Image (tube, rainbow, N blue to C red):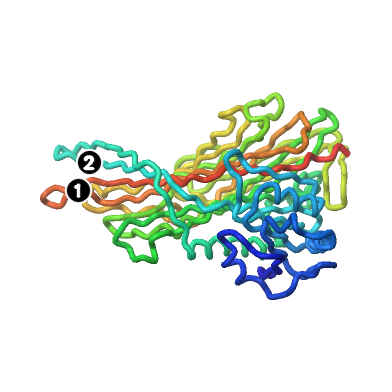
Amino acid sequence: MSEQTIVVGTLTGSLADAARQSADGSSFLASGENKAPILMSGSQVARLTGEEKQAVKSTYEAGYPIVLLDVVSEEINGLHGILETGLSHGFAPGVVHAEAYGINREPGGVLAQGTFYDVEVEFKADLTVNHRNEDGTTVDSSIDGGFEAVLDTEESQQFRWASVRNWIADAGKRFDQAPKAAATETNQLTQLANAFIDTAFWFSQVVVPLGFPPSLKTLTNQYQVSSFCFSCFSQNNQSSWFYIQQQGVLNATNSYVFNSATGQGYYVDTYQLTAWPTDFLNQPALVSMVQSSPSSTTGTTQVTSSVNFSISGTVGFQGKQGVGQVTGGMEVSRSQTVDIPDVTVANLSNVNGNDAAWRFTMPLCHGIEDGCRNSIDPCKVVSRSTFQPFDQWLWRATPRTADFAVTTRFQLRLVLTTIGKCNIFGCNCDVNQTSQVPTLSDHIFRLPYPPKS
């Protein structure tokens, strides 16, 4: 789909200037269907006339994304009301605003939404010095750097708007990205039921130390996590089942500016993804974790994530042709293998009763122990490029509230490894590990419960 948009009203917010450049120049049709994605500020939702609301809805139903800039939760809920999606929205505690929010209706009625969080405004900075004594022993000392502020830049705004623009262009193709069972397999949940697709975008900025060109003062990385959610309802035990596949596209490329024998960074040494049922954390009697994958692995170049479970009896679901049911049980089965060179995977699920969590760890760079130690080994490619983890899990829920909310937490640590003080011979140098931990918002998305059929 074209990434060009039709603008309604006046755009506001940090991405407004960059977004105006993507407008196709067409005027918004206040009646009927518009033939392009619609872009407007969140505040414009309340100002739409009845005729304009119908035009926005018609455009959405034709498969074009509707995107709001500079938006708060009430405005997103107002858009859901206009579009009659049946969804509700709420940010995590402490979050009041997003740079952008988009929703579109994929072929077959699949709903997809994207939330683009405000760029971080601060990060936690720390320094660890590994000092080598003359007798060959080493000792670590740490300095708490506190929190440092990050200034936004026009270059960063252009980069972030490009993420929104790419999300718009993906309309109509998102469901194809969901790993599904083969079409020949019978009673497979991922073949029969519609998916709900939620994508969260976070952006972190790295402040480069003095001495680098002005153009490298602030560098922006993008971290994208998509959740493909399938659900069904079991008549036998009167419970709802939520099967979620989570795919990350975590890109640390833009912060890797030190690449020499005396400095490597910034690169990632840790990613962590955690998800939990927002209203039922650590209440496994109400929402239980049935399976989670992949398992913990160390020293492998690939990891396989597998879920295989049978839900017996009569099972209802929302499919492309409306509400459906099967009487011979429903299968939830998916196996996917991804390359993870130089990555250690730790499955931390169920630490809090029913959460799904994984930690992905890459090696730190170290001083080369060649008898002198005045240089650093290069960092691993995966820690300075795009890493695409895949994890999945199955929840069983007994209560049926207004909707089923899921909280996703994304965490990472960026590291700069440099050579520090050396002895009078230029050897036995300290190795400094400077870390930056971005302050990123938790993300909440809400799912409709599957029909009882």
Give the crowd class for mark 2: few <14, some 14-19, many >=20 residues within 10 Å: many
Q: Residue 121: image x %, image y %? A: 47, 50
Q: Disc 1 marks which residue?
A: 421
Image point (60%, 36%), residue name: 356
- Which residue is at 73% across, 48% downward? 77
For residue 15, what is the image quadrant? bottom right
Residue in the foreground of this view, choosing between 331 and 102: 102
Residue farthest to the bottom? 25
Label 2's element?
Answer: strand
Quarter placement of the N terminus: bottom right
- Is the C-beta separation of discs 1 and 2 under 8 Å? yes
Q: Is residue 181 left or right of residue 125?
A: right
Q: Is residue 376 left or right of residue 241?
A: left
Residue wearing tag 2: 131
Q: Is residue 51 left or right of residue 177?
A: right
Residue name at image x 60 percent, y 49 percent: 97
Pick the front one: 106 or 31: 31
